[in-house]
Amino acid sequence: MIFNNSNHWLLIVILLIAGSCSSGNKNIPDVSDIVVSVSAERWDQQLFELEGKEEIAEFLKQHPLFSKQFFHLDLYPHDSLAVNYLHAFLNNPGSSILKEEINRVFGDLSQLQGHLEQAFKYLQYYYPDSKIPKIYTAVTGFAGNDLYVSDSAVIIGLDYYLGEKAAFRPLDYPRYILKRYRREYIVPSIILLLSTGLNRTELEDNSMIAEMIYYGKAYYFSKQVLPFTADSLLIGYSGEDLSNVNENQDVIWSHFIDKKLLYETSHFVKKKYMDERPKTLEIGDKCPGRIGEWIGWEIVKEYMVERQLTLPELMETSDARQVFMQSKYKPQSL
């Protein structure tokens, strides 16, 4: 497989204006009359101000959403071990540097809150009865989650998203994943995770195409809720990766057809095309990982052109094979 080798990935960090957006968002709804207010409770600041183990223990007791869902208190053999960890972390000299970097990158969170408010306006346009989740920001020294998302609450681990210049970064993440841990990816990641509760699927269908369509619907949903956000930010590909796959759509699709992959049910085979990998070498050394997710997105785009459904109707469509067949997907490289 032939891919060009130009380096355009730095371009993905901007939010594109409407005329620059792809994915077929030609009729972006007007949400200016929808009123949404987003405020964040700064657990990160509260944590930095705690003094002594008793205050830390009380914080964990008073904030079960943080301690259980985000910090995973139940994984510690005893609560005192979690308290000791947080005490050591918060009293480490590096914590003052971390606090300064959080302030430098995120400031008063006004920009992040603004992006979330805009996203939730579109969410309420498509789902008028949807509730706006409460936003919390936290820090754990990478001992907790990067994100926790439910329909009622979102917790953001700010220490994960400080970017490449940060003094401290997660140690166990490969570079091709770590490059997505920047503040530009926070809102797209939240919306993608929020789609999970709305994305109907046939659980008994274990085929590759079912998984592809599931992710395709998730990315399509994200694009409708974030219509001005670059596709590369939504799927986590570099600009170069996205250009390459678009230029080689027919080659990628031919591989799936020739290898009879669409109805493959082997987990070992599926993970080669669906899981996090730096490259899908089975197709080519310039083909990014998770290529099945990207193809699923392309199929869903075509399905929506053919069917002209509303976003909720799409997300309620659980028959992945129906989506694929009715999409009439026949890629042509750009």
Image: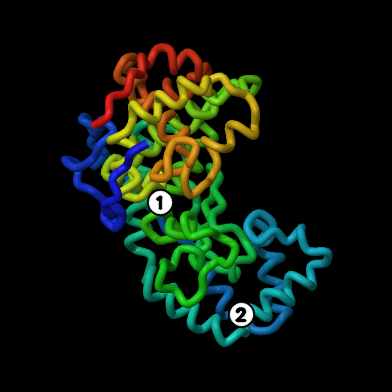
Local SS, label 2: helix
> Mark 2 or 1 closer to N-term?
2
Query: Looking at the image, is 223 positioned above or below residue 74?
Result: above
Q: Is residue 122 visible?
A: no
Outermost residue to the right: 77
Question: Which quarter shows the C terminus?
Answer: top left
Q: Position of residue 296 (x, y in %)?
A: 43, 29
Quadrant assignment, res 185: bottom left
Indicate the position of residue 71 as horizontal and vertical percent values. 65, 61
Residue 187, numbered label: 1
The kind of residue on which mark 2 rests is Leu
**Residue 29 place in picture, x, y as percent:** 25, 33
Q: Which residue is mark 2?
A: 90
Q: How is the image coloured?
A: rainbow
* Residue shown at the point (43%, 68%) measured from the top left: 162
Q: Residues within 10 Å of mark 1 (few under 14, many from 20)?
A: many
State the image coordinates of residue 142 (x, y, percent, origin top left).
Answer: 59, 66
- SS type, badge 1: helix
- Of residues 311 and 240, the one nearer the viewer is 240
Q: Is residue 199 above or below residue 6?
A: above
Q: Is residue 327 left or right of residue 60?
A: left
Task: Give the residue at x 31% y 54%.
Answer: 9
Q: Nearer the viewer, residue 329 or 106?
A: 329
In-front residue for pair 6/158: 6
| Residue 105 found in image quarter | bottom left
Rounded to the nearest angstrom, the CA distance separating label 2 from label 1 is: 27 Å
